[in-house]
Amino acid sequence: MAKIPVAILGATGIVGQRFVALLADHPWFQVTAVAASERSAGRRYGEACRWLLPTPLPAAVRDLPLTLVEPPLDARLVFSALPGEIAGPAEVLCAQAGHIVCSNASAHRMDDDVPLLIPEVNAGHTALLAAQRRRRGWPGLLVTSANCLTTQLALALRPLHDAFGLRKVAVVTMQALSGAGYPGVSALDIVDNVLPWIDGEEQKVAQEPRKLLGTLNEDAVLAAPFVVSAQCNRVPVREGHTACVAVALAHRPDTEAVLAALEAFAPSPEVAGLPSSPARPLRVHRVVDRPQPRRDRDAGGGMVVHVGRVRSCPVLDVRFVVLGHNTVRGAAGGAIHNAELLVAQGWGD
Amino acid sequence: MAKIPVAILGATGIVGQRFVALLADHPWFQVTAVAASERSAGRRYGEACRWLLPTPLPAAVRDLPLTLVEPPLDARLVFSALPGEIAGPAEVLCAQAGHIVCSNASAHRMDDDVPLLIPEVNAGHTALLAAQRRRRGWPGLLVTSANCLTTQLALALRPLHDAFGLRKVAVVTMQALSGAGYPGVSALDIVDNVLPWIDGEEQKVAQEPRKLLGTLNEDAVLAAPFVVSAQCNRVPVREGHTACVAVALAHRPDTEAVLAALEAFAPSPEVAGLPSSPARPLRVHRVVDRPQPRRDRDAGGGMVVHVGRVRSCPVLDVRFVVLGHNTVRGAAGGAIHNAELLVAQGWGD
Amino acid sequence: MAKIPVAILGATGIVGQRFVALLADHPWFQVTAVAASERSAGRRYGEACRWLLPTPLPAAVRDLPLTLVEPPLDARLVFSALPGEIAGPAEVLCAQAGHIVCSNASAHRMDDDVPLLIPEVNAGHTALLAAQRRRRGWPGLLVTSANCLTTQLALALRPLHDAFGLRKVAVVTMQALSGAGYPGVSALDIVDNVLPWIDGEEQKVAQEPRKLLGTLNEDAVLAAPFVVSAQCNRVPVREGHTACVAVALAHRPDTEAVLAALEAFAPSPEVAGLPSSPARPLRVHRVVDRPQPRRDRDAGGGMVVHVGRVRSCPVLDVRFVVLGHNTVRGAAGGAIHNAELLVAQGWGD
Amino acid sequence: MAKIPVAILGATGIVGQRFVALLADHPWFQVTAVAASERSAGRRYGEACRWLLPTPLPAAVRDLPLTLVEPPLDARLVFSALPGEIAGPAEVLCAQAGHIVCSNASAHRMDDDVPLLIPEVNAGHTALLAAQRRRRGWPGLLVTSANCLTTQLALALRPLHDAFGLRKVAVVTMQALSGAGYPGVSALDIVDNVLPWIDGEEQKVAQEPRKLLGTLNEDAVLAAPFVVSAQCNRVPVREGHTACVAVALAHRPDTEAVLAALEAFAPSPEVAGLPSSPARPLRVHRVVDRPQPRRDRDAGGGMVVHVGRVRSCPVLDVRFVVLGHNTVRGAAGGAIHNAELLVAQGWGD
């Protein structure tokens, strides 16, 4: 099978770089176009980009010329790692031009007819695309991946919601520097420090899980009936968000039942066959001091989400720690995973 | 007034050093004895101690000889910064020998007849000392300061409990390196990392606030009727614990009422007169990105506790962030503050 | 004596903030004006400035309105913490308008008739000001303080040059984050990393010490006859530059003679009387693992420079480590120190 | 070819873990025995070892029982990652018992008849083994790899010495935390700090390069005729030592000639065929801000050494920066590389 040509919008940023790295040896996709801001357009990727990853910049992308973030793009699929304010209109233009757009930006995540998608969580929500095509009249289509923290949270919540019925979710986060982009956080703000606030983050974490775990209802998703409280912090960690979670459940399981539900969580056969799917999306740790970002973030190429310290909670019902790689599973890897799902379901034809 | 001679047990550790630094110019107390493990006994303090603080080692203590952690001690008051397993019996021996013991160790905190004390929170709990003397027959006495995280938490909870009645407290912590002592945490465990577990910490944070905010009932403290869930993490910060807190309250105040209660919190006249009392024990921040450990931990010489990001909570009732200096307010400074209270109340006579 | 009114140009930056903090209780100077970029002009200092220091923003400055960085300024003395490209013309305008300008910027440091000044190193170089007035016709005057790293280096080199005659100086630096200003270095560039290059730094460190240790020759300074090699690195340290130095000397002293020369280094009576002068500008450490930035940078309010690990060198003659506080002694504190010298010498009349 | 069974002494330490990870898929070697201190002996490796690497603990080693660090060992080859004081006698016992010992410890590095070996630098020094067998009468043999910093330094110096004749070497280091082992450096000693001293390091860096670049002279190595000055510092970096180097050369090449010599440096055909040999042992960077530990340490699986900022030096002749992975190329990877060389040269038969 010839590889599907793909473009990356916002290719020089920190998430854009992750797209480039993750797509370097992808079995289905091949990067044929990279786009960035007007300032960089026309230059070679390797010259315009301050490459931040420890793995080398793939040779096949180094010499691609940067184009503007708009059609025409020499690609079938388009990955968007654009900043919020630009992403909205650019992604619509791409879908109008016939591209399959897999966005990591927040602009359209909560739109009624745009699937907010994590393959292991809600692969069926791609059914919204029928409504999207009908309403929008686009020859292309648009799906979104969730906020980085939301992604790892939703993966841990999915089996709990299915088995026990979520009622309340309280989450306190310790988020990595890469989540703020580059240059992002000043070293003077974070060395020997914690920042107790991340602009816009808490609202996303409060909203998005309810759509992700919601139920399809004709042409929209009915939000799942639980509430989320998020308190978001930045800590001096390069990659990997850690979150302390407490949940109230309709059925009050004991800790072993919770552990069993988490450990049994497996992808559907459709999802299991995707190139980016780890054998198990969750790794459950029973040693007392895990997960830790530096030790666990890279498991499964960064696509595994970790759960640990599962125990009962005297205030809600159950407590645990969730850790995930924010720029792989929580950003570029998640969007690629979504693209794989679309291809597997035939939306790419 | 001649200064009261004081001894420091465990004087070479990181909390012991804070005692030395904080007592350097104390108006009421003068360090006349320092004690440490058998290994160091007999050596001069300045030789045996690896001084870790940025301020210089006070000259008056540098040449004091280290003694064993047991009577006789050339002092009236004894501060204990001993590790838990040693602290228990050593503190009892000192009280039996007639010393006023102000301990920072956890060994006796939950004993029925031992006050667990924070001057602004429960100065009246020193009334337990009458029972202590009656039961134990000690010529001396023993009071304890709370766990570092508990201390800052209890200071923030006191006005909320008084005004609105606490029912539930959920706290997730991001704790500083100094809390683990020296050498404590290996750099390889914490640079670019978070540790999601601190041995023994969560139990202390769950128990101690209920005693601190409890009510005196004859010869014991009746624990306050709320539950606490604590999830404790270590982060790469030198000093200053940050905690995200959510509380359920019997009366459901709006955010402004909560802010007003916190801002109005002032020490009693008795406590306000103590040398270590800041004018206000709480500083309430209304800017969105404070408190931060590096920017706020040293306010009021490290004795001010900070509250910020006060807002309503969709899961419990109110959320906020609490920050305090863990080795000053949460350890050495807290124990010195307690000693000042005992002197002011006449227990030192 | 009424305090001399002073203005701070570039008052909102990281060095500007150090000026504000250091001048808060200055016995001779009082901040009466603060100036910053056009963007901030008109706003109150406390609103426009993201205050980064752990000590509180002084109340007297908080409400001062920010003006443009040009005359008229409501002050006699002007401190400049402006970025290089703006500093040059702005400082000239201020001297033309009659101000005594003490600059921390690099623009005019190497000008023939502008003293590059460190009071303990070359107080006599203020004699250049006669030539400056003659040539420039300014009613005011302009002196400069040296580059941060140069300052601490020159303080250590002065007694060695006097006693043994410097021939060669090789310096490798490990410089703090604050030296890059705010936001300056991205956390993603420096957490778990070293940057082996600092733009423009090596040239300054190679040139400036020769002027500082040079000899007055009519209307200019004859550069001292030694060469300097500088290799400059950025490390994850907040404040305090560390430098490993090796020197070749005309006379080849043994290590004890070098230590003796460093330890004997004392300010002249004129300089000793300045408010910012520490009793001894150098602290010589004989323990093997000092100086260290976190433990030593704050000594003497940040005005003491530390020398340690003095030993013979098989390649040049003598090796040692030098450490100083880069934004106090190496920036704001140094410029204030220079202003004090000018006042003491009567240039302020 | 059946894989050669190998044992790892000191297998649970940080270098021991690197051996385990690097040997997991080695084409020639298979780990059949792991040995550690008496305290761990008898336990399974996976239980006794606090695994610190981000890659998973290889399954084949997880269940191996830990033995004592002495013969008999179920292996042909023995890798030693023992601490210095234990390594000396243990390695001799192993060689006496017939094992091929490739040591990373310092105990025997400077012994006359023990090769100190880096394949690309001095593969011919294995000729010393004939003398070793004759003198010692061991059925086995012993070779050593160099100190971590020395290794990367010697790789950069080899082509310069060959082309231009080294006379003097001045090196200032910024060394990673992993070099101190685990737990090693306390976080309180290094967060926001630099330590200007590493016990014993400077002497090793001064001595070992002269043996590595020395010439074989009958039964010993005649040390190369240059002097080395080393000033060693610890910085808050997890892995990867950075060193600023200046050299004086007998022939004074211009910078381009130096760059050309470094870039031309290639392994001999014998060495090029070893599994751990990178195509080029040196990567020369011409951009101004490289190498950096986090960006460059992992190149070539950690076996590539980086050189950058090559330029002339006003004090000596040429300056540059060298960076290498201290626990791969500078420790476990280097010792494995030596073992490969021995096998290729037939010493393993």
Image (spheres, coloured by chain):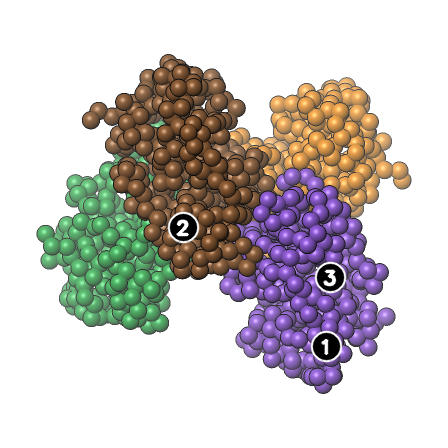
Chain colours: A purple, B brown, C green, D orange
Q: CA distance from mark 2 to mark 1?
A: 48 Å
- The residue that mark 1 highlights is A219
D245, above or below D145, in the image: below
Q: Secondary structure at mark 2?
A: helix
Circle nearer the N terminus (3, 1): 3
Residues marked 2 and 3, same chain = no
Residue drawn at (45%, 38%) of the image: B214
- Seen from the viewer's position, the closer of residues B198 and C318 is B198
Quadrant holding the N terminus of chain B = top left
Residue ranking furthest to the bottom: A137
Please state which amino acid type lies under the numbered disc 3: Val
Q: CA distance from mark 2 to mark 3?
A: 43 Å
Instruction: Tell me the crowding category of disc 3: few under 14, some 14 to 19, or many 20 or more residues within 10 angstroms, Cα based.
Output: many
- The residue that mark 3 highlights is A121
Instruction: Tell me the crowding category of disc 1: few under 14, some 14 to 19, or many 20 or more residues within 10 angstroms, Cα based.
Output: some
Please state which amino acid type lies under the numbered disc 1: Asp
Please state which amino acid type lies under the numbered disc 2: Ala
Q: Along the horizontal axis of the image, is C253 left or right of A119?
A: left
Q: Secondary structure at mark 3?
A: helix
A87, above or below C196, in the image: below
Q: Quadrant of residue B102?
A: top left
* Chain for disc number 1: A
- Name the front one of labels 2 and 1: 2
Percent from the top left, x then y, of residue C55? 33, 49
Residue ranking furthest to the right: D1
Badges 3 and 1: C-beta atoms under 8 Å apart? no
Percent from the top left, x then y, of residue D23? 76, 40
Q: Is residue D199 at least partly visible in the picture?
A: yes
- Name the front one of labels 3 and 1: 1
- Seen from the viewer's position, the closer of residues C315 and D78 is D78
User: Which label was assigned to residue B163?
Assistant: 2
* Chain for disc number 3: A
